[in-house]
Amino acid sequence: MQQHVLVFILLLSFSAACGQMLPDRPFSVTYFTVKADQSEVVSSRNIFVYDAKGRLTKSRTEAPVGNNLFTSHLVATYTYDSRDSLTGFVFTGANKPNGNAFRTRFVFTRDERGNKVSEEGSAWDFTQKAWRKTQRTIQTFDGQNRVTGSRFSNYNETAQTWGSESVSTYTYTDRRQIVESAGQRLITLYDEKNRIIQSTSEEVEKGQWVLKHLTTTDHKATESVSRQYSHPKISQPYSIVTTRQNAQGKPVRVNFQLNQSVHRITDLPLDPLTNRSFNSYVYDTAGRLTEQVNWEYLIGTTTTRRTIGVRYTYNNSYPDQPALTVYPNPTTGLINLLNEGSYGCVERYEVLTLSGQIMQQAAASVDIKLADTPQCSPKINLSTLPDGPYVVRLFLGDGSVVSRQVSKKTAASK
């Protein structure tokens, strides 16, 4: 299964890239796994929010917690300049296993042609209430907007300086791109339609370049075949990937065939039950991708079974979700809080009457696991309070305050 999950993730990245060309942008992407009885279990979903210009302004990664409820454990917000170029985004979420909040920011600068010339990452220090630099990448471009150089470095917090740089150089000749860095290089060859037809990775050994990996792709009108080779078995492919396309040039079926003997030599993960699998793609009448499913064969049979999949929905006018959900409401005592996108965990809370009298106040005791999903929200027990309406006031890690009204109603009074 591991090999199929890896392949599927790579194809999801490919689908996301293809999605940029679709007539409408996806509102939600739901990931699911398939059990032995072929029943589906939702594992997570992504929600996307766009502005009037169609620019992505927010995305959320959510995990199911039962009863059609989802909790957000990763949120990203995006910003743009006057030319609609992406200038940065902020990731906010909670880590396993301790449930601590994290907030990571990436800021881009671009030249007059829109090329991203620098990218700087930083992490929010919740104690000092300040951003701390973590890493940066600086790029240069030629007159054709092609990258010619890239320099990456980490920030040394103790010395307050940028550390040593990892440098990559890009050169172009005869439809070929060469990326070279620290004893490694990747050579990519393109055809006249700018499709990749060959890529090789090489490393320096004893002063000479040694081929380590080779991928060739043969493009046809409705089908392409990629063969991947790995040193030292360079004469025999360890995998063959065949992509069948529809009339619009979109993949409808991608077949994977693995040479198990070579695969074992490369020490990559191997599912002993399968050596073949395929992905199927479904589109709606507008040409939008609506479903992608991975299937696998049992060795020695023609039987296939679904293993994992993803579904896409489209609705650009869908409103943003509230930042925090309280459930159940009304409650007999215990309430849960789904923290959907706030900058930081709930650090403390107050329970007040509608007239403003404080009935409870405490530092948040975070339940970090709910249905095996990371949490950044406390459970609050109102069982000692009289029945009636209350206001729960939450103090968040970014300094903001959120209030929600909840009704306490015991079972006897229902």
Image (cartoon, rainbow, N blue to C red):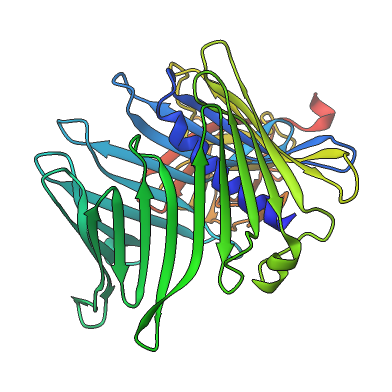
**Residue that appears at 12% across and 39% down:** 113
Residue 125 to residue 6: above or below? below
Place of residue 361 in the rendered image (x, y in percent of width and height, measured from the top left): 53, 51
Q: Nearer the viewer, residue 230 or 350?
A: 230
- Quadrant in which residue 408 is drawn: top right
- Quadrant in which residue 306 is drawn: top right
Q: In screen coordinates, is 354 left or right of 39? A: left
Place of residue 168 in the rendered image (x, y in percent of width and height, measured from the top left): 26, 66
Q: Nearer the viewer, residue 81 or 345?
A: 81
- Quadrant in which residue 369 is drawn: bottom right
**Residue that appears at 75% across and 48% down:** 276
**Residue 357 visible here:** no
Residue 354 to residue 143: above or below? above
What is the count of numbered marks? 0
Name the residue furthest top: 285
**Residue that appears at 82% across and 44% down:** 297
Place of residue 248 in the rendered image (x, y in percent of width and height, measured from the top left): 50, 19
Q: Nearer the viewer, residue 198 or 62?
A: 198
